[in-house]
Image (spheres, rainbow, N blue to C red):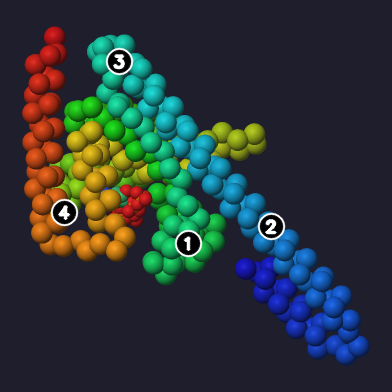
Amino acid sequence: MENENSLQKEIELYLEEEDIDKEKIRNFFETKIADISKTRLYEFTKLMAYYRCAMMEVETKLNVLNVEFSLQHDRNPINDIKTRLKSFKSIKEKLERQNLPFNLSSIESNLHDIAGVRVVCSFPDDVYMLADALLKQDDITLVSKKDYIENPKPNGYRSLHMIITVPIFLAHEKKLMKVEIQLRTIAMDVWASLEHQLRYKKNAKFTKEMADELLYCAKISAELDEKMDKLRSLTQP
Ligand code: 0O2
């Protein structure tokens, strides 16, 4: 921004002069502006790469826990891990919605879900076991936690959300990056995926009846999780 303001001042000074070769000056400034854009794009891409690395760190940690648990208990607590990096468009829209500036430091300090890891677990107990095991690791710091399993959202949404920081080790520095982790069971994941599809379906109305039906489905899905957890405990030696 500072660069752009000083550039603007330079342009104004140049244009005040008489006998100027406007074409030459225009070319000069166009190149300068292109350089600024290139630098900004590079810095943005670099930040996104850091978030990608942080996601990879978290994914590896979860895979290690999965392997260790499966060796001890002869079953996998993790059914699936999905990672996603927030798109440029979503980042811009989210900052705009909150009237926040769109620059790198604003992205880093205001958005906590640039890097997202979704962990689909077999049973509800696995959600908490994995969350605890991850938070016990000495390089992980918990920033915030929302337990929508204990306290589901009014629409029925259930999941355990955590924002954590994890270090990434670069050639010359260590950076702490934020990652949003959503942990949920298979039943919770099915519900959330279908609810998202129905709610955001283009050219279709999301009615009160549909919301009520979905809430009912969330209740059934919670019952299913409870029953499955009971069955699992019966199979434990
Ligand atoms: P995407 O594309 O999945 O990232 P925040 O976004 O963190 O500033 P909030 O409301 O505090 O705002 O976040 P919260 O409650 O932790 O939920 C954020 C994410 O959880 C959402 O991300 C969804 O992925 C998921 N989520 C939350 N509520 C619902 C819900 O009712 N239904 C479904 N299907 N998913 C939900 P984004 O940014 O919406 O999208």
- Rounded to the nearest angstrom, the CA distance separating label 3 from label 4 is 34 Å
Residue located beneath label 4 in the image: 155
Along the viewing direction, whichever of 140 and 146 lies nearer the viewer: 146
When asked about the image quadrant of residue 75, the answer is top left
Q: Callout 2, which amino acid? A: Lys
Where residue 127 appears, as percent x and y from the top left, is: 24, 31
Residue located beneath label 1 in the image: 92
Tell which residue pokes out farthest to the front in this image: 203
Q: Is mark 4 within 8 Å of ligand 1?
A: yes
Q: Callout 1, which amino acid? A: Lys
Instruction: Tell me the residue at 69%/68% (across/down).
Output: 3
Instruction: Tell me the residue at 19%/28% (across/down).
Output: 123
> Quick one: label 1 or label 2, which is nearer the N terminus?
2
- Rounded to the nearest angstrom, the CA distance separating label 2 from label 4 is 44 Å
> Quick one: label 2 or label 4, which is nearer the N terminus?
2
**Element class at badge 4:** loop
Residue 116 shown left or right of residue 101 in the figure: left
Q: Callout 3, which amino acid? A: Ser
Instruction: Tell me the residue at 38%/36% (across/down).
Output: 82
Residue 95 shown left or right of residue 203 in the figure: right
- Rounded to the nearest angstrom, the CA distance separating label 1 from label 4 is 27 Å
Where residue 193 appears, as percent x and y from the top left, is: 27, 44
